[in-house]
Every structure is written in C-alpha cells, then in structure tokens.
Image (spheres, rainbow, N blue to C red):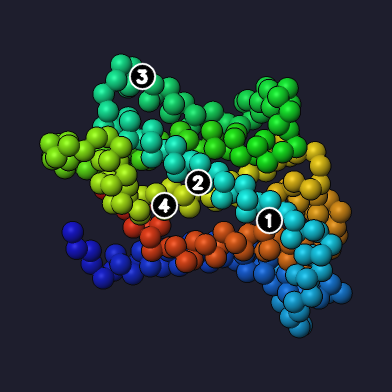
Amino acid sequence: MRISRFEASVNYILLGVFAIFSLTPLVGVLLSAFTPTSESRSGFQWPSTLTWANFSEAWERGRFSDYMLNSVLVTAGVVALTIVLSVLAGYAFAAMRFPGRTVLFYVMLLGLMLPVESFIIPLYYDLRGIGLTDTYWALLLPQTAQSLAFGVFWMRNYFRSFPDSVLEAGRMDGADDRTLLWRVLVPSSGPAMMTMGLLIGMWTWNEFLLPLIMISGEGLRTAPLGLAFFQGQHATEQSLLAAAATIVALPIVIVYLFMQRRFIAGMLGGAVKG
C-alpha cells in the first residue's frame, strides 16, 4: 500500500515530536552528568563547562566496579541458561507429541502473567531454607525461571514456523530429534535467539526487587541495586547521581546499538513467523 506525501510528512512530524519528548529527559541526565558539582542542581540546565570527573568520582565512591561485574555475571548466566532451556522446551512443544502437551504449555504461559511481587516472599523463605540467599544462585535461578515463560513461548512459535517437510525429510534420512534440533533448527534460529537473549538481558540487568530481597550483603549487589543505595547516600549531589545512572545504563545501550539490526530482524521475523 502506497501512502501520499502528505501522510508521510504527518508521520514524520509525529515521530519527530515523540522523539523530542522521549530524548529530552535523557539529554537532561547526560548534561547533568557532565556538569561540575559546583553548578549542580535539579532540572534541565546547560553547564558552563563539561567535565568527566563526575564519572570517575561516582565509579569510585559507589563501588560500581564490583556492582557492574555482579550484574554482568548474573545477566550472562540468566541469558545463557534461559536460551538453552527455552530451545529445548520450545522444540518439545513445537515438534514432539506427548500427553498433556497443550495443557502444560498454557500452564507455563501463566508465568507471563505473574508479577514477581506475588511470589517474592515465599520464594525468599524457600531459598533461605536451603541456604541460597546471599549467593549468585539466589539471583540466577529465580530470574531464569521468570524468563522461561517468554523464552519457551518465543522459541516454540519460531520452531513451528519451519515447514513440516523439512523435519520429515530429516527423519526419513535417519535423524533423531536431537540431530534435527541442533543441526537443522538451531543454526537457522540465530536472529530469534539473539533477539530473545537481548530482551532477557535487558530485563535481567534492570531487575531491582529480587536483588533487593535476596541479597543483604554489599558484595553481591547488582548495578541497579547499588545505584539505589548510592542515591540514598548522595541525594543532593545531582551531577554524581546522573553520572552513576549513566554508568549503569550504558552497557545495555551499547549492546543494543551494536545488535540493533539483528534485534529488529529477529523481531520482524518472529512477528511474521509467529
């Protein structure tokens, strides 16, 4: 369908207006992060000079080297576990036949509807009872379980998009389910797995409530949790807070910028094939 030049112009104007509204707060945070502490104040402002000192000071005073490392380890672990388990379960629900398959799939989808607030207290007591609180496992296992509902749904839909003739031809050649999965389906599912991994990585990196409840010691705090404590200690130092917030957000922004094309390709492919 072709649109007129007037409609295209209106679309671009509306998108431009929304972009301005979306980017203005981000620009304000960046400007505040580069503002000298002597000029720091709340609200949008243009500094007289730009300084990098706020970033180094926030990094050292906030112990963000430890917190960022914790977030990287937790995020990488959750993404890796979720991708492997989602690929296995997604293939089972898409290509294998077993009793209760449909019921079990929809029960798993209930995980998309349950907010973490609804089970965080019993989960804490369960993990404390087996001695897992204040460990990486208290962050890895619950967040992997949280992500599995989406991951299984995503990979199941993607695997179902493959023609049945491809799978039947493989079975006729003597390939079993393991061979079909790892040698036929997985090599062709790179964009879908990358998109899923990026989404889960962003959700895991930004998770705040689980680390807050499960981690009491300072050594295992993640970056968002460390930022919250840093904010409580430096509530009036706007430039330091802006620099710390930029430090915490920057890794995800960089990863998205480098993977943007594959992310969009995976989203479009999932939308078309799903």
User: How many angstroms separate mark 2 from mark 1 (CA)?
Assistant: 16 Å
Q: Could you tell me which quadrant the C terminus lies in?
A: top left
Q: Disc 4 to disc 2, how far (Cα)?
A: 13 Å
For residue 103, which numbered disc appears in the image? 3
Q: Which secondary structure lies at badge 1?
A: helix
- The amino acid at mark 3 is Val
Q: CA distance from mark 4 to mark 3?
A: 27 Å
Q: Please, what is the three-letter code of the amino acid marked with disc 2?
A: Ala
Residue 239 sits in which quadrant? bottom right
Counting residues from the start of the chain, the first of labels 1 and 3 encountered is 1
Q: Residues within 10 Å of mark 3 (few under 14, many from 20)?
A: few
| Crowd around label 2: few <14 · some 14–19 · many ≥20 (10 Å) | some
Farthest residue, direction top: 99
At 70% across and 60% down in the image, what residue appears? 245
Q: Earlier in the sequence, mark 2 or mark 1?
A: 1
Helix, strand or loop at mark 4? helix
Residues at marks 1 and 3, CA–CA distance in whole angstroms: 40 Å
Secondary structure category for the residue under label 3: helix
- The reply to whether residue 164 is in sight is no
